[in-house]
Image (cartoon, grey):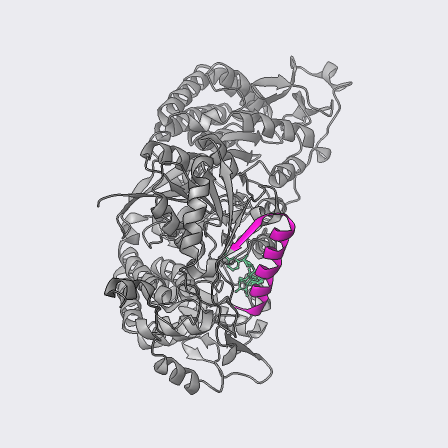
Amino acid sequence: MPQIKEILETMDYGPAPEAADHVREWLKAHAAGFGHFIDGRFTTPVADQTFEVRDPARDETIATVSQGSSQDVDAAVEAARAALAGWSATPGHIRARHLYALARHIQKRERFLSVLESIDNGKPIRESRDIDIPLVARHFYHHAGWAELIASEFPDHAPVGVCGQIIPWNFPLLMLAWKIAPALAAGNTVVLKPAEFTPLTALAFAEVCREAGLPRGVVNIVTGDGATGAALVKHPGIDKVAFTGSTDVGRLIREQTAGSGKKLSLELGGKSPFIVFEDADLDGAVEGVVDAIWFNQGQVCCAGSRLLVQEGVAARFHAKLKRRMATLRVGDPLDKSVDVGAIVAPVQLQRIRELVAKGEQEGATLFQADTALPQNGCFFPPTLFTDVAPASTIAEVEIFGPVAVSMTFRTPDEAVALANNTRYGLAASIWSENINLALDTAAKVKAGVVWVNSTNMFDAAAGFGGYKESGFGREGGREGLAEYLVPAWLKSLPKAEDVPALTLSALPAETDAGGAATLTIDRTAKLYIGGKQTRPDSGYSTTVRDAAGAPLGQVGLGNRKDIRNAVEAAAKAGAWGAATAHNRAQVLYYVAENLHARAPEFAQRLLATGASPERAEREVAAAVERTFFYAAWADKYDGQVHATRSRHVTLAMHEPWGVMGLVCPDEAPLLGFVSLLMPAIAMGNRAVIVPSVVQPLLATEFYQVLDTSDVPAGVVNIVTGEREPLARTLAEHHDVAALWYVGSRQGCAAVEKASAANLKGTWVSDGRVRDWFSAEQGQGREYLRHATQVKNIWVPYGE
Ligand code: NAI
């Protein structure tokens, strides 16, 4: 006779299906097809302009949905535009009540929405019921609070306007909430396009908007595929595009919106490392892997898909992991005891199969437990590759399926090198019982979210988003809200007339062969790279003249090679970012003092350019003051501890981008230069700066100040020459992480387009003219915000 214990241990799970009657009835009631949700009403579906939505687990059609045309997008944008004035003027407290109402209605429908999500997407009901939908409600509650607080917490900010939001299929309703809740809280109106595989919960949400009494036009939902998305992105009536999806489409959107003045946030792919140190709690880490890569069938942008295991424990860890894989149940998403559901669509399943076949061809060792799969539907078993070469396809490409690849490392430095050996930088998970090691690694990993002894934690209070080609901008937290606001001063800047970009060929340029002899000035200013004055690679210089055309001196004509050298020098000066903020503050104070000591010389230079004595003096004084200002900020623009729901403290750290390209305005040649350079280096970035094309001698004079102020070599690199080609080279350069550009609209368009190469963060002036003397426009938090990116580190805290 078997013992009860034995029976319990060997007993198999029976099916425990979640009731789906309500959802099936709802789908039946919409058997004629779903229209779009525009201006508070559903449109009538038009024959031939629809597509079918399928349940990937049962391989059957469940709904017919409208394919949004450009006219549909026009109508939705128009409705959002018409609603904007009223919604943005609605008092924060009233907006908050609308958001509370949405949250409450979602909570009331939690069961319905969970089942619908699982049927539409294929994710296990346990996940949609316990994770997705509760987080959706949480997001609306949290942002209802923000609506209440925005006026006091973000003084002098305005909503961006009409937001076009495009979301993927992996967390359909959760991604909707991440996009819509902050947008509405900040007073924007939206047009959202859900993914073509999974539009149903967005349509159910549209019903919720109606039921909850949201004013019409505030939320509009247009269904369709990539063509509908593209029409939304290109629509001139959109002020901001927020996109989550593949890096390829993100890059396309970056190119398409270049020069449009549209604000952009991109949350793209990842290949996130999951680092297991030898002192980790291995059983805990095994459970971590389950949540990292088998959660949502691995269709998670921040999935811990690259396991990096310290050599000494690798064999033991892999053995434990394989044992655990054998217990994972793959099957009907509506079965409450299923761990792994269906892949979203046949095309994704095919992609996973191809990549897995590639892994085998590449010589990696494949392991799949003897997992039973349903006969029909899109299913793929949990898969582990070991013996993976770091440069192989499966180690580099986002598989977006339940496939983990595992590599080993020996030392913590090697772990960090491997972790960062990717074009992505979305997330990382670090497992160690040694908090020093874990936090030290967290600081060194280039990723927007880091989980210590945990993984795939999300909360409305914490920012989420990536470094490098994982995109830019954050969703969630205070930092996410900022993406839906603009400082009022920035919004009100006058738009400059389109002027032809100023190039040196348009200036009376001479080579240094003959020009120098006629000059009243002593020397030819060189470039400043790696702490040294260097000759331009081209061997050419150009004459700088005053307003009346008289020669003032010569500067080097920098080219691509000089920019590359400058970026290389900046890349080597990484110690600046690792220095304490206190140290950086001291150096900036020293710069400010030395600039002050040389004030008469700088004023003299400005006088020579044709500035009046009063203006020259004012500009130097303002430059000194601004340098002191950023010295003061260097150790004060610190992060936050977010109060996330789980037992974690979530440290929102402000980190420097790394190497920044700065392209200065022509006007205010000293103050403009200082206004871009100082916030960038105060935050720990290294800069390659292209000064005013018309009057670069103020910048070249600045070397002396840098040389005498303990600014380490390579932190500031100055390349003079023609602005547009230099800016373009900076925009294209893969080691430049962020770029600020002040100049013409055409110039802005060119750099934004070129920046798509590595999806660097850009901040361009959109051809708007700032008053550099104004304390509001020429300095402040907006500059500091653009000089940093936020890394959220989740650290277990409490029990
Ligand atoms: P996708 O990037 O094509 O789709 C995401 C959304 O963008 C959908 O709503 C789609 O209709 C829309 N879209 C497509 N082309 C567009 C365009 N030209 N302009 C505007 N919107 C457009 O992703 P897809 O094809 O569904 O999946 C392919 C791969 O992308 C996956 O295997 C995965 O590697 C990655 N992916 C990453 C996601 C993430 O959360 N980071 C989410 C979905 C996919």
Residue that extends furthest to the right in the rendered view of this protein: 514
- Left or right, 738 with respect to 186, comes to right
**Residue at horizontal 58%, vertical 31%?**
692
Please name whichever residue, 432 or 523, is drawn nearer the observer in this view of the structure.
Answer: 432
Q: Which residues are magenta?
A: 345-367
Q: In which image quadrant can residue 15 be found? A: bottom left
Above or below for 52 versus 186: below
Above or below for 582 versus 345: above
Residue 353 is inside the magenta segment: yes
Q: Is residue 749 visible?
A: no
Please name whichever residue, 10 or 39, is drawn nearer the observer in this view of the structure.
Answer: 10
Instruction: State which image quarter holds ligand 1.
Output: bottom right
Percent from the top left, x then y, of residue 604?
Answer: 53, 18
Percent from the top left, x then y, of residue 142?
Answer: 29, 57
**Residue at horizontal 40%, vertical 54%?**
324
Quadrant the N terminus occupies: bottom left
Percent from the top left, x then y, of residue 188?
Answer: 40, 61
Residue 48 is inside the magenta segment: no
**Residue at horizontal 45%, vertical 29%?**
577
Q: In which image quadrant can residue 17 be found? A: bottom left
